[in-house]
Amino acid sequence: MLLFEIAIILIASKLAGELSVRLGQPSVLGKLLVGIVLGPSLLGIVSNSDILQEFSQIGVVLLMFIAGLETDTDEFKRTWKASTYVGIAGIIAPFSLGYLAGIVIQLPILEAVFLGLLLSATSVSISVQALKELGKLKSKEGTTILGAAVIDDILVILALAFVMSFAGGDVNLGTVVLKKFLFFVIVGFLAWKVVPWLLKKSAHLRVTEPIVTAAIIICFIFAYLADYTGVAAIIGAYIAGLAINATEFKATIFEKVETISYSFFVPIFFTSIGLSAEFGGVIDNLGLILSLSILAILTKLIGAGVGAKIAGFPWRSSLGIGSAMVSRGEVALIIAAIGLESNLLTQDLFAILIIVVLVTTIVTPPMMKLFFKDDVNIEETRGRSI
């Protein structure tokens, strides 16, 4: 049954991506929507099984690894200040208004804070694919978005640890901060000294594809270290890509890892997001779902957009950057699961927020297309769609 489901996902994702491009949208939008169609909410052809979730996790890790390989590192260094403005402004607006929304719907203060925190999260994995298709990944806007997403994730995770310490969880804030600091120290050293050495040594091995295998190992180890220290696996994978970006093996690794990823794992990741949708009880909570969805979209769009404007971007580019930060994706899903487990979210509110997260993820690619459309030639990017 698993093999049949995978075949269905791959067929449907490619066809949906082609249709989406023909309709003038990034192909990733089709991948997200076809997951809803195939999943339990509609046709029920594909189930969101544990093994598909594991394949999905590999897909998003490889996607962010490729983003690191493609990042213009010189531009990345030049945009760190803009990334900081976007990342911080993109947290302040959704956190503040998310907290107020929690108070309005009569949540206790700690639960309202948690709601604001959840709405502050950003998952840039969807935006990465849209940026690739729009030809903007290596641009000043693209590198600003990637840097801002890393900053956003780090600050939100630290704030989450702080909130959990008040919620009675077994969390020591000092330990949490130390683990994250050690992660960046360790991977910084590995990226500087160990990664180039390991790739050079691998090149001399008389086995099949030693360099590509070594690169994937580096990616997975960095992702594991990030996940283990509570940073987020996708950040570790992105840093691994940046580390290899600076080596002579970048082009070879990029070409072959991209082939592996986009032919199998990445389509499963995008489709699995739609598979997670559960629409039971939507009608009863439609008003709250719509309100929170609008709040989630506008606070990131405007908050991060204002940060980009402060950093010197024109308004259109600023709103494009803001739109790329709208997707909450898997990061918010993880936070929501923590909230449910810690009784900071009720089962009903958890279900509502899953739909809100899905809405923010689906609207991100067309919003990016809208604001970046003057810079895009769809015909040139069709070959890059998955």
Image (spheres, rainbow, N blue to C red):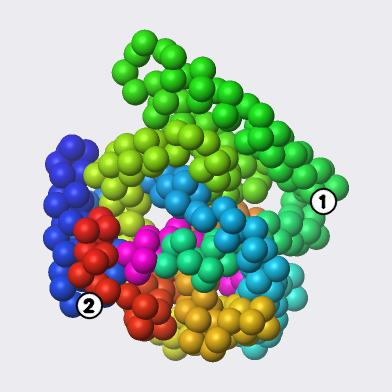
Q: Position of residue 243 (x, y in %)?
A: 57, 40
Please state if 349 lies on the left or on the right of 339 as rendered: left
Q: Which residues are magenta?
A: 119-135
Q: Mark 2 sits on what residue? A: 24
Mark sitting on residue 13: none
Circle 1 residues within 10 Å: few <14, some 14–19, many ≥20: some
Q: Quadrant of the N terminus?
A: top left
Is residue 125 located in the magenta-colored stretch of the structure?
A: yes
Where 316 sits versus 62, above or below? below
Asked if residue 137 shows in the view, the reply is yes
Quadrant for residue 377, please give it.
bottom left
Q: Nearer the N terminus, badge 2 or badge 1?
A: 2
Q: Mark 1 sits on what residue? A: 173
Asked if residue 296 shows in the view, the reply is no
Is residue 197 located in the magenta-colored stretch of the structure?
A: no
Circle 2 residues within 10 Å: few <14, some 14–19, many ≥20: few
Q: Could you tell me what secondary structure mostly forms the magenta stretch?
A: helix
Where 355 sits versus 177, above or below? below
Q: What's the distance in space between the residues labelled 2 and 1, CA to CA?
A: 47 Å
Asked which secondary structure carries label 1, the reply is: helix
Viewer-closest of 315 and 94: 315
Asked which secondary structure carries label 2, the reply is: loop
Q: Quadrant of the C terminus?
A: bottom left
Residue drawn at 79 percent across, 48 percent down: 177
Please state if 304 lies on the left or on the right of 51 as rendered: right
Please state if 205 lies on the left or on the right of 223 as rendered: left
